[in-house]
Amino acid sequence: MSPMPTTEPVRADSPAASALATILEARSHDIGGLTVGRVLPAIAHRMVGPFIFFDHMGPAVLPAGSGLDVRPHPHIGLATVTYLFEGEIIHRDSLGSQQAIRPGDINWMTAGAGIVHSERTGPEQRARGSRLHGLQLWVALPAQHEETAPHFQHHAAETLPTLEHAGAEVRLLAGEAYGRRAPVTTFSPLFYADVSLLAGTEFPVTDEYSERAAYVVQGDVACARERAGPGRMLLFAAGAAVALRTTHGARLVLIGGEPVGERHIYWNFVASSRERIEQAKRDWREGRFPKIPGDDLEFIPLPEST
């Protein structure tokens, strides 16, 4: 596993102490030729509600003739969630799904008992060059749903609920918050929202969930006297009333939900037992996972260590 993000504990005597639990910094990591900022898991704080993984991709320029090539690889015990601000990714999986992911869409793949997928730049984008900017998160499934049958959901941008409030525009990507519910089927209480703030806006973070965080994509926000710019995640104290302010404008995402319990993580596998992780490792090493129709000539080998 790559080095974990560093943390910055909030001083106990700080005015922000009642609202902030800690601040996480994104750490550079390479995936398929693209450098990402990895925020979760962190040593001091592994999960936010059921969210166990958080990567910020780009913004990156992919020159003509090159592109993203994340070869076929397996998952168990989680759902992958891909959301783009710019660019396009072609998703393929072992269920036979083939889907272009474009800005504003939500792409939700439930691995459950086991699935294989790939993420690549399409031929047209690869030929002319493109930009790529987005987020990929993993959601750990509750123990009773870890072995659910894998399935795939894709919801176009125009199907996702939005609301405007006092200088803020909110698009709800998953779960329920601010009186709206997203169409994505989930297995535990959670929310995931894309929020754009105009200059001078103060915006309240929903208090419906025990664990909540805000990640700054662009611009900067303040919570009490603490400020955060791009690549920083603010984790909020349980039950605290939280308001985020921006002087010049900002774009951020909010995540949160209820904890699902401790999880083991190895490479692309998430499970509530070490034994299940070991079984998945053997299954991938010995070729027992299903293949991806149309993308079955390559694969990522099981790493010796992570």
Image (spheres, rainbow, N blue to C red):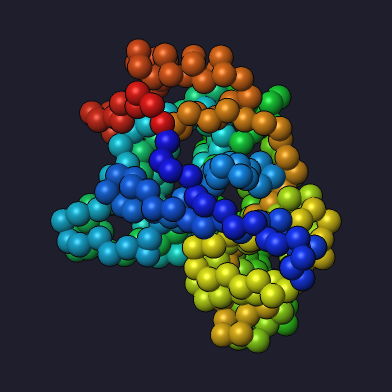
Query: In this view of the protein, which residue sits in the foreground, 132 or 282?
Result: 282
Quadrant position of the C terminus in the picture: top left
Report the label total: 0
Residue at 27 percent across and 48 percent down: it is 33
Residue 288: name its quadrant. top left
Image coordinates of residue 44 in percent, x first then y, are 61, 44
Image coordinates of residue 290 in percent, x first then y, are 40, 22
Residue at 38 percent across and 26 percent down: it is 305
Image coordinates of residue 150 in percent, x first then y, are 54, 29
Determine whether, in the image, residue 278 is placed left or right of residue 292: right
Residue at 57 percent across and 19 percent down: it is 274
**Position above or below: 24 against 131:** above
Quadrant position of the N terminus in the picture: top left
Residue 133: name its quadrant. bottom left
**Position above or below: 120 against 285:** below
Is residue 45 visible in the rendered image? The answer is yes
**Position above or below: 191 against 282:** below
Residue 251: name its quadrant. bottom right
Residue at 48 percent across and 28 percent down: it is 266
Image coordinates of residue 70 in percent, x first then y, are 32, 41
Is residue 104 visible in the rendered image? The answer is no
Determine whether, in the image, residue 64 is placed left or right of residue 75: left
Determine whether, in the image, residue 203 is placed left or right of residue 80: right
Query: In this view of the protein, which residue sits in the foreground, 253 or 228?
Result: 228
**Position above or below: 181 against 259:** below
Query: In this view of the protein, which residue sits in the foreground, 293 or 221?
Result: 221
